[in-house]
């Protein structure tokens, strides 16, 4: 089973020089337990929900045949969407954010690539 994790710099493991981020810790955990999961980190610094949606659409078109019904998809993002710009607005407004998540869910439902989809957030911010 493959676990594909799409996200932002937190997903990527940016600035975690000791452990390499939470995904690397997940890989180590599975390895120690002898679990047969292949974990792929698809986090990119600076990505917001719009960027991840574009990448996921391309990814599923390219790899649908290869990983059919064999993948768990984890989406972990949100910090860059909530980034406050100089004009006082967020980089991605809440309605766009919601639509992007709904599109990710719909693509996932329509896709034979995925056996399970998980959304998570790992950063608490005040809104």
Image (tube, helix red, strand yellow):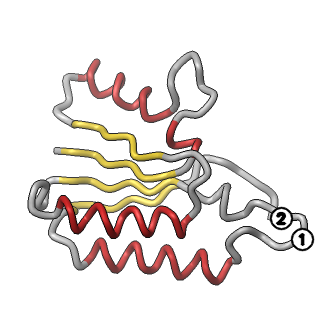
- The extreme right residue here reads 87
Residue beneath the point at 10% across and 55% down:
66
In the drawing, what numbered circle is on residue 88? Answer: 1
Q: Are marks 1 and 2 in contact (CB under 8 Å)?
A: yes
> Residue 114: which numbered mark, if any?
none
Give residue 85's mark. 2
Residue 55 drawn above or below residue 93 = above
Instruction: Name the residue at 54% across, 34% down.
Output: 13
* Residue at image point 27% right, 61% down: 116
Quarter of the figure with the N terminus: top left
Q: Image check: 85 left or right of 52?
A: right
**In the image, what residue occupies the spot 18% across and 59% down?**
63
Image position, residue 55 (x, y; %): 40, 62
Badge 1 marks a residue whose secondary structure is: loop
Quadrant position of the C terminus in the picture: bottom right
C-alpha span from label 1 to label 2? 5 Å
User: Height in image: 28 above or below 107?
Assistant: above
Residue 88 relative to residue 21: left or right: right
Circle 1 residues within 10 Å: few <14, some 14–19, many ≥20: few
Image location (x, y in percent) of residue 20? 50, 25
Q: Position of residue 31 (x, y in %)?
A: 26, 22
As rendered, which of 42 and 25 lies closer to the eye?
Answer: 42
What SS does tag 2 mark? loop
Residue 101 placement (x, y as % from top left): 49, 73
Q: In this view, does 30 lie above or below 108?
A: above
Determine the image quadrant of residue 36. Answer: top left
């Amino acid at each position: 089973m493959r676990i594909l994790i799409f996200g932002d710099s937190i997903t990527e493991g940016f600035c975690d020089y000791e452990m390499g981020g939470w995904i690397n810790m997940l890989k180590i955990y599975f390895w120690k337990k002898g679990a047969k999961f292949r974990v792929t980190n698809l986090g990119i610094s600076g990505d917001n929900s719009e960027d991840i949606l574009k990448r996921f659409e391309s990814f599923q078109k390219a790899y649908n045949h290869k990983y059919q019904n064999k993948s768990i998809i984890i989406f972990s993002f949100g910090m860059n969407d909530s980034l406050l710009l100089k004009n006082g607005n967020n980089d991605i407004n809440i309605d766009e954010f919601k639509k992007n998540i709904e599109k990710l869910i719909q693509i996932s439902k329509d896709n034979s690539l995925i056996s399970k989809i998980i959304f998570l957030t790992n950063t608490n911010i005040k809104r």
